[in-house]
Amino acid sequence: MKLLEGTRVIDLTRVLAGPYCTMILADMGAEVIKIERPGTGDDSREFGPFIKNMSAYFVSINRNKKSITLNLKTDRGKEIFKELVREADIVVENFRPGTMEKLGLGYETLKTINKKLIYAACSGFGHTGPYSRKPAYDLIVQGLGGIMSITGQTDGVPTKVGASIGDITAGMFTAIGILAALNHRNKTGIGQKVDVAMLDCQVAILENAIARYLISGEIPRPIGNRHPSITPFEAFETEDDYIIIAIGNDTLWDKFCRIIDRKDLLEDSRYKSNQLRTEHYSKLHATLQEEFKKKTTREWFELLDSNGIPCAPINNIKDVVNDPQVKAREMLVEIHQPGVGNFKLPNLPIKFSETPGIIDKPAPALGQDTEEVLKKHLGITEDELKKLEKEGII
């Protein structure tokens, strides 16, 4: 039995934050019915890269879902949606706040149809506050949320995080909120609205940057790959590439200095504690950098890793997908995508001992499940389906 088996999700999301959330739910066994616009569908169906005219972007975050087409701007389309909601557990949408209300399908309306409904809204700025109705994309919230101001090299330009962390963290927090609300509903029988803002999520993950500012009044700046309060904890250039070391306590520092044959550093009063090492960062960095240039990355990794020093090379994406640990954890799975062939995707990163997540369905073609869903869940006949299609409702 799958973890969320028997849980039905009506998915109105598109592009990334919302679909990432519903992908997590689908991977854990929920029945996710993705509602898309007739004719065009989710915007991300048009995003590259493409494999045989199919968007790899769309495929990667819409596996395990069903797709139906439904025009929510028509009265009959709204009626069908409400009928689906009546028997659903969860509705997820990532429209700009006010959109669902304008359609007459907001939470206050839907909860009168289904009092147990969990209604999750994932948006740029949330359903309250002065920015609520503003449009938002990942880059916008990375800028407003402060993370770009602390990312990049010292004295460099503000830099976005390489992954779409604004969207992805919002998708993850929305999934967490849904699961918590589902647990509450299973105990009380009462549903609720889950309101998640991309900007809020960026603020939530700033951890020590906000703590440092509130305590010291000093505004954090980009400092490259080093840690602001642990030293040495960064990437060093080697003879041929880079090596990351993470000396997280004084015991490791002692061990590290002995392994690299620099016991003299243990006697230096400037480096007796982590706080002192951080205060004298520039001098220590220059000294260690000189040492690390003497060997290759592989040589350093073998020496340090074999002696229990936390370290790593900086892998490129090819290295990651071929990493033995990534393979051992089955973090890449292969599915057969109709029209494309076999296709590899990142797996669900949560490992359950009794109810493992399974990617057993490829991303759906636009509207491929419309007939099945409407017949099975609403009892709509073949003749009515043809009429709905002719009228542009599905």
Image (cartoon, rainbow, N blue to C red):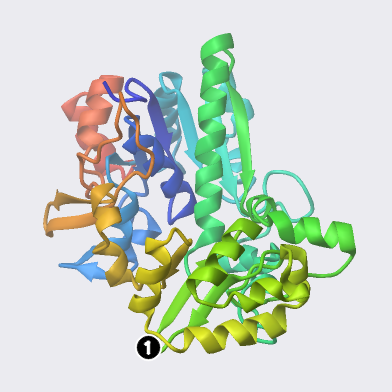
Q: Is residue 213 above or below residue 385?
A: below
Which residue occupies the extreme top position in the image? 188
Q: Where's the C terminus, which quadrant?
A: top left
Residue linked to disc 1? 240
Q: Is residue 315 above or below residue 141?
A: below
**What kind of residue is marked 1?**
Asp
Give percent across and percent down for residue 74: 44, 40
286 sits to left or right of 71: right
- Near-viewer residue (366 or 169): 169
Give percent across and percent down for residue 3: 35, 25
Give percent across and percent down for residue 104: 57, 35
Determine the image quadrant of residue 11: top left
209 sits to left or right of 78: right
- Near-viewer residue (321 or 285): 285
- Near-viewer residue (10 or 2): 2
Q: Where's the N terminus, which quadrant?
A: top left
Q: Residue at x 72, y 57 (%)?
A: 208
Q: Residue at x 64, y 67 (%)?
A: 227
37 sits to left or right of 55: right
Q: Is residue 312 visible?
A: yes
Q: Residue at x 50, y 29 (%)?
A: 179
For disc 1, the neighbor class at 10 Å (few under 14, some 14 to 19, many from 20) is few
> Could you tell me which secondary element the residue under label 1 belongs to?
loop
Give percent across and percent down for residue 382: 17, 28
Q: Is residue 236 above or below residue 16?
A: below
Q: Is residue 137 visible?
A: no
Determine the image quadrant of residue 348: top left
Q: Is residue 58 above or below residue 82?
A: below
Q: Residue at x 48, y 70 (%)?
A: 259
- Near-viewer residue (269 or 224): 269
Determine the image quadrant of residue 393: top left
